Image (cartoon, helix red, strand yellow):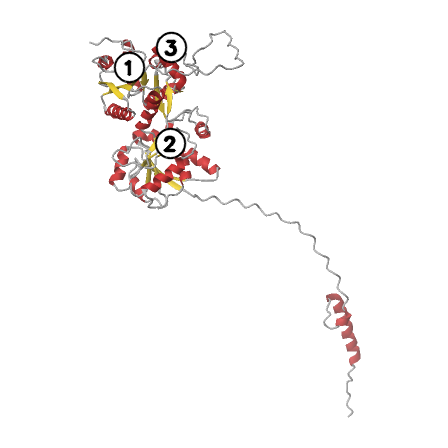
Amino acid sequence: MIAKTKKYRPFPRLLAACVACFVLAALTGCAGIFPGSQPPAEPTPPPPPVAPVTPEPTPPPKPAFSNSVAVLLPLGGPFREFGGRVQKGIKAAQDALAAAGTPLEVTVIDATQPGWADSLRQLPPEVTVVGGPMHRLTLKELETAGLLQTRVFLAFMPSLGEAREGIDAWRFFPSADDEIDALLRLSATDYGINQFAILRPGDRYGQTMGDAFAGAVSRLGGQITATGVYAPQDPSSWEGTVGDMLRTGGGRPGYGAVFVPDEWARADKVLPAFFKNKVDDLLILGPQLWTEALYRAAAAKTQINIQNYRLAVCPGAWWPENQGQATQQLVTAMHAAGIEHPDMWEAIGFDFARMAARLGRLPQGSSPQEVSSRLAQATSGMDFSMAPLSYTPDGKAHVSMYLFRPSVTGPVLLDPEGFRQRLNAIRQKALENPAPENEQSYSPAQPAPGVPAQPVPAAPPAPVQPQAPVPAHRQAIPVS
């Protein structure tokens, strides 16, 4: 049997496979089989230019507080109004400092709340300066608790009581000595009066102020030649007390000025006793209490008995008409906050915060001498909103207070030379009627209404030297 064998014909299959590969390569770009047959790749076009992206501006970091202080204020109780006013002044200063790039952190502690002493103890150690306190009882508590030695306290008080100023604590506030200094600077230094009287109420304030005045007069080489003490609650005795004081017989010298340290409301009823006794040529020296009352009267449009004050002056640490930058900055800020009549309390807070920024951080454990020196440097040349404050080398604060004269519009800054002319004119009986109460009250000559002013001469005359006032009032009451 012949077997039939199937012949294998590979060429047609190979040819078909090759054709399939060529087709596949054309469709898929497969060049791995036939590398020489791949067409050259077209050049890739460059990417379109990308517009530069402007980065979003990074907000400046919030400035960290480079300085931190605390204040101890009465924000409740009977002194809350004063504490609140100081706080408003501090806030105005903080806003101004932040705008200038020197932020100040202020921690406010309410001295009328329970636990205030613990809040003080828990302050960070870098808070070495504390403004306040404002009340002697709070200061006494600080002293009893041993806290005065832990930080530097700048009290908003006229006196530190038993605490040693410049050692135990410091002040940032005008004192009774500052008031008296301003009054004697005018009467003794400028006017040459060296004989004085004191007419005061028989209370602690009257005695304290009277004793301080007598001591200051003695240090200047002057004399207290008469003293009258009246019962504050017995108006019927006031005229008799004044009359007794005015009888300067028995060989005693007279006096050219009388110091009346009493509140305005009561002094306003005591002063007419001088005029009833026909004495109208005394220079009357009042305390800062009068200035504060005059501001309140002007704000409330309350009339005052201006005829009692033609020769009266009184000191004050606040003068809102001062055109200095700090004063006007504070006035503007307070008006924006809805406070129409800012006073010394806002100025205390405003100036304290700004002074603290100048002071910087005090190293812990600084000696009293180092603290006093730093305070003196910080206040030197400072633009104060209130009357300028300075420190002596031993840490005593001194405020160069303004002097005012009472007027129907409130306190008016005193013109010493104009006032000297009025004083002399009254003493020489040349002034028959009260001068008008305005800014020109003390001009030696005022043109009558409707009369044109005289032309200014081509060459001004030589200045006339002012006359010194008569040093003592004329005796008007016979010696009994």
**Viewer-side residue, 449 vs 40:** 449
Residue pictured at 51% horizontal, 8% vertical: 452
What kind of residue is marked 1? Lys
Counting other residues with Cα less than 10 Å from the Cα at mark 2, is it few (<14), some (14-19), or many (20 or more)? many
Residue 222, percent from left and from top: 28, 22
User: In the picture, residue 155 is in which quadrant?
Assistant: top left
Numbered badge on residue 434: 3
Mark nearer the viewer, 2 or 1: 2
Horizontal relation, residue 85 to residue 229: left or right = right
Q: Which residue is mark 2?
A: 389
Counting other residues with Cα less than 10 Å from the Cα at mark 3, is it few (<14), some (14-19), or many (20 or more)? few
Q: Which residue is mark 1?
A: 269
Against 31, is 312 above or below? Answer: above
What kind of residue is marked 2? Leu
Q: Residue furthest front?
A: 462
Residue 236, percent from left and from top: 22, 13
Q: Earlier in the sequence, mark 2 or mark 3?
A: 2
What kind of residue is marked 3? Pro
